[in-house]
Image (cartoon, rainbow, N blue to C red):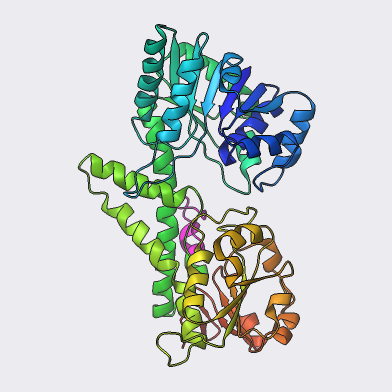
Amino acid sequence: MKICIFGAGYVGLVAAACFAESGNSVITVDIDHARIDNLKQGIIPIYEPGLKEMILRNQAEGRLSFTLDVEEAVKASLVCFIAVGTPPGEDGSADLKHVLGVAKDIGRAMNGFKIIVDKSTVPVGTADKVRSAVQEELAIRGDNMEFDVVSNPEFLKEGAAIDDFMKPDRVVIGCDNVRTAEIMKELYDPFMRKQNRMIVMDIRSAEMTKYAANAMLATRISFMNQIAGLCERMGADVKAVREGIGSDSRIGYDFLFPGPGYGGSCFPKDVKALIKTAEESNYDFLLLKAVEEVNELQKEVLADKLIKLLGSPDEEQPLTGRIVACWGLSFKPRTDDMREAPAITIINRLLAAGATVRAHDPEAINEARKIFGDRIEYSSNQYDILDGADALAVITDWNEYRNPDFDRIKTALKTPNIVDGRNLYKPDRMAAGGFSYVPLGRCSGGICGEVN
């Protein structure tokens, strides 16, 4: 099938590579000249395991190309995916100017029947706006060509996006035309060989499904972070609590790990957008407002623990003269994405408190430099940043941090303090090793996440 994808960002590149991998002819369009030039040369703008290799392979085999030419891409394609950004506005609503701009571009370039697919995360009712934008351009041209608009939300996890696309939990298609639905089924059929996970519904329900899914996952994270805070105060162990509730088949274990709060390009933006959508419908979404508030507070928790552990009586800059080594900068492992990353809030708090901050991350150091510049120190070696530091803060749960050389850590640190924002280590082992260990919500062997 002949496809064009507007947007050479995270979603667009993953979709383009995976569709090409299944034999389709895919043209990816973007307005960023430098990005398209780099992609043509095999330079990939994001880190996602397996993505670079897949893009290069399909480019070499002629199934995947990149262009700035909108008209060329639209005329050569039956299915046109819109996968551009929908950044939050000041009021939290999703900004649709890029989506509607692409819709107008498609309307100006159409040369026959097209299926226009909203792949971007968009509010309920966006398909209607896309349809109107295309119709307006056709009217200006004096044409009355047939087209359909489909909602096909993405459910990709950064760090596992290729597997999620190639072996999806489900593919949601929002469509009001039987013929178009069959074409979309044919497009996704290669990904359904093991089990048919296609769900076809009306367009507005499909648009809502994406927001509802991310809001539910964000809710689970904020809930477990609140449980962890209560466990610290009640002398309970959040790890045991998680096992106890996760074993209930109605609940399950996913997204029930306490941590420094959720971040990334999806959860924060989508929670805000759904709250705003509700407000526009005169509906007060109290639960999601609480989820968002809890998450913002949770991003402060690790810094609070470090200040309590290391701080001086100086109320304004209690960490003056202190060095904190941070493991992890990206909002989650297996990505270099630092959008809304808890590390940003944590490090800014530490800097404001007067600390010297050193940081390591396997992939996100270049992104961190854009945010912090030379205000913090960076190293490509996770142990080098420990020398003479007053504490180690574990922020992101990269595999490299799960089973480190504790003897080396203890020798390098000025004082053997570890504040673990991901509960990677066993409190009993830390106590036996002579560490002052501060996890989240864990009380075991006389060690509690609450700093005494």
Determine if residue 241 is in view: yes
Q: Is residue 260 left or right of residue 424?
A: left
Q: Horizontally, is 166 left or right of 287 in the view? A: right
Work out whether residue 24 or residue 381 is closer to the camera in this orientation and state it: 381
Q: Residue at x 79, y 29 (%)?
A: 60
> Which of the 4 quarters of the picture holds residue 103?
top left
Front residue (pair 189, 80): 80
Part of the protein shown in magenta: 242-259
Q: Is residue 246 magenta?
A: yes
Q: Give the residue at x 41% y 29%.
A: 100
Residue 179, horizontal then vertical, whole percent: 48, 11
Q: Is residue 86 left or right of 338 when viewed as pictured?
A: left
- Residue 237 visible in the snapshot: no
On the image, which quarter does residue 381 sit in?
bottom right
Residue 36 vertical position relative to residue 420 in the rendered view, above or below: above
As drawn, the residue found furthest toward the bottom would be: 313
Looking at the image, residue 336 lies above or below residue 86 = below
| Residue 378 shown in magenta | no
Quarter residue 204 falls in: top left
Question: Where does residue 21 sit, x and y in percent of width and height?
Answer: 71, 29
Question: Where residue 297 appears, x then y in whole percent?
Answer: 39, 67
Q: Residue at the location (52% across, 55% down)?
A: 253
Image coords of residue 4 (percent x, y): 59, 23
